Image: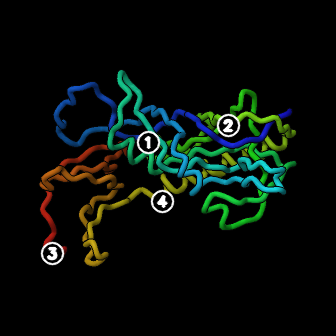
Amino acid sequence: MRFGRALAIYGMGVDCHAGMPPSQPPVPPAPVNPVPVPSNVVASMYAMYPSQWLMGKFSKPTVHTEGDGGLLAGHDWGVGQPHLFTGPVMIVTPSAIFTALGASHKYWIPCSAVQEPVEGGLVNGATGGSGAIAPVGACCLMSTQNCMDVSGAGFNAPTGIGISTPTTRQVGVTCGDIVAGIVSLLTDCLASFASSKLGHDNYEIFMQRFDGTRKCRITFTPGADVLPVFSPDGKYLMWSSKRTADNTTQLFLAKFVYPRYLN
């Protein structure tokens, strides 16, 4: 199979994430807790270019790349990509913001026959070395893997499309490259599952002073307590928790008393 190689310019995908479901205005009052929060389909867009310079993996335009830089396999669009919960109206919720901060949209198919130096982004470029390029298919499109979580289990799936610059450079992609990409995808999937399901079952909420001293634990119940949000007047705290037998995500709302220990 023949593919091109080019730079990323845009992309989009579909994720599944646990979070606050969309609703049409007016927003109803907060229901009595606990409130089950199911996984929802989320539309993601790859549009935050600065994130690529941090999390990406590419070669820069230099003599040894024929004056043209390109994406390398494992190139990640990075965190902060916009996520919108789908429904009657595409809206942004607090859950969508937290989801975007942990986003991953990676080019997972390599072309091992063409190796180029790893010169960017910031994380991967610091390690140097070389990597296989990420080939671009017909109409400047290529599959990307997206991060997901369902019932507390994280995983990755090839549910996104990256759009790249037009190119006339051709490279050969073999069945071995496809297999290598699948192995890489499954490896990331296993790592996501292990870290979310096995290592993140009992998160707790803490507070500390601005100078980093006097850390105080707020939650003590078994199960993950995450994503705390204060009311504007600071009198209430809302957070997500998994403390039931069926491991569903719920929203809790409670009056908050500032710990004297932090004064």
Q: Position of residue 45 (x, y in %)?
A: 51, 36
The residue type indicated by label 4 comes to: Gly
Total marks shown come to: 4
Mark earlier in primary sequence (3, 2) = 2
Mark 2 — residue?
A: 164
Lower sequence index among marks 3 and 1: 1
Give the foreground label among 2 and 4: 2
Residue furthest bottom in the image: 213
Name the secondary structure under disc 2: strand
Callouts 3 and 2 close, C-beta under 8 Å: no
Residue carrying label 3: 263
**Local SS, label 4:** loop
Q: Residue at x 27, y 50 (%)?
A: 239
Crowding at mark 3 (Cα within 10 Å: few <14, some 14-19, many 20+): few
**Could you say which is closer to the camera, residue 14 or residue 68?**
68
- Gap between marks 3 and 4, in whole Å? 32 Å
Could one spot residue 174 in this view of the protein?
A: no
Q: Of circles 3 and 2, which is in front?
A: 2
Specify the amino acid type for callout 3.
Asn
When the figure is inspected, residue 116 is found, relative to residue 185, above or below; the finding is: below
- Mark 2 nearby-residue class (10 Å; few <14, some 14–19, many ≥20): many
Distance from the alpha carbon under mark 2 to that under mark 1: 34 Å
- Rounded to the nearest whole Å, what is the CA distance between mark 3 and mark 1? 38 Å
Q: Secondary structure at mark 3?
A: loop
CB within 8 Å, label 2 to label 1: no
The amino acid type found where label 1 is placed reads Ser
* Residue under numbered circle 4: 199
Q: Which residue is mark 1?
A: 151
